[in-house]
């Protein structure tokens, strides 16, 4: 089994990190040792050095400051009352992150369905809040932990070829909506149904 991605993977431009995170496996190890895992099939980048979204709407000053932690550490923001999982990027003191938007379940499906019962399995982890609940993540326990910790980590996957990657505007934004910073695996049924903020 490959070693988990290190925090150094995220010490850079979050747009590049989001693109290269496609195909990685997010692994959650429950207190009892059960493993839940899913392939990252969708991710978005946020980079406050050049991102109008960081100063508008839900990306207000407090949340922007929360992103300015050391790279490669987990953090959450809340949207419409739901926690969303992200990883800090760039150097400490600079607000930037990658949001994990959707997973394709690979292991522990039964436990995921216990955490988040759904009638259609494809709706289990096809959204950023959905995957947080399906994995049974507690933001208070995970936030600020390194991305290669034992309870929650990312394993590298095979590179996803460019021809299999869709690039769109991000979802749910009023500012910065023209930036092509959402990356997804084309044709994957677990990609979120979120509508891009604008057509590119």
Image (tube, grey):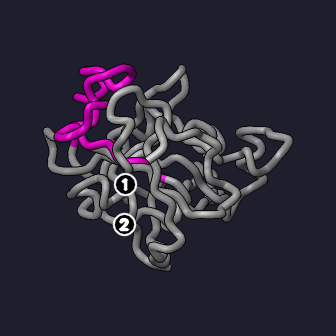
Which is nearer the eye, 19 or 111?
A: 19
Mark 2 vs mark 1: which is more N-terminal?
A: 2
At horizontal 65% and vertical 62% (from top left) the residue drawn is 188
Image quadrant where residue 154 sits: bottom left
Q: Can residue 95 be seen in this view?
A: no
* Image position, residue 139 (x, y; %): 46, 34
Distance between the Cα atoms at labels 2 and 1? Answer: 7 Å
Q: Residues within 10 Å of mark 2 (few under 14, many from 20)?
A: many
- Secondary-structure class at tag 2: loop
User: Eyeballing the image, is 142 above or below 34?
Assistant: above
Name the residue located 71 percent from the left edge and 48 percent from the top edge.
112
- Queried whether the magenta region covers residue 47, the answer comes back as yes
Residue nearer the viewer, 1 or 10: 10
Residue 76 x %, y %: 41, 35
Image height check: is 196 above or below 166? Answer: above
Circles 2, 1 touching at the beta carbon (< 8 Å): yes
Q: Where is residue 89 in the image (x, y as percent from the top left)?
A: 26, 50
Q: Position of residue 49 (x, y in %)?
A: 17, 40
Q: Which image quarter: residue 4?
A: bottom left
Q: In this view, does 146 lie above or below 96?
A: below
Position of residue 73 in the picture relative to residue 149 (left or right): left
Q: Does the magenta stretch include residue 84?
A: no
Q: Residue at x 55, y 54 (%)?
A: 28
Give the quadrant of residue 15.
Answer: bottom left
Task: State the mark number for residue 147.
Answer: 1
- Report the disc number at residue 64: none
What is the magenta range? 43-69
11 or 177, which is in the foreground? 177
Point 36% across, 40% down: residue: 178
| Badge number at residue 5 | 2
């Amino acid at each position: 089994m490959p070693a988990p991605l290190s925090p150094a993977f995220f010490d850079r431009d979050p747009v590049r990190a989001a693109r290269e995170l496609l195909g990685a496996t997010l692994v959650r190890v429950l207190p009892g040792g059960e493993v839940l895992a899913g392939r990252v099939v969708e991710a978005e980048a946020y980079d406050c050095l050049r991102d109008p979204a960081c100063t508008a709407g839900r990306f207000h000053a407090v949340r922007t400051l929360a992103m300015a932690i050391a790279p490669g550490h987990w953090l959450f923001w809340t949207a419409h009352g739901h926690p969303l999982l992200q990883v800090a990027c760039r150097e400490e003191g600079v607000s930037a992150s990658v949001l994990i938007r959707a997973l394709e379940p690979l292991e522990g499906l039964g436990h995921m369905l216990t955490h988040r019962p759904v009638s259609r399995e494809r709706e289990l982890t096809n959204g950023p809040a959905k995957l947080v609940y399906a994995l049974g993540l507690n933001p208070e326990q995970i936030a600020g932990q390194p991305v290669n910790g034992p309870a929650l980590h990312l394993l590298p996957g095979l590179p996803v070829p460019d021809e299999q990657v869709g690039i769109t505007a991000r979802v749910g934004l009023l500012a910065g909506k023209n930036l092509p910073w959402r990356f997804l695996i084309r044709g994957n049924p677990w990609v979120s149904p979120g509508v891009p903020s604008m057509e590119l």
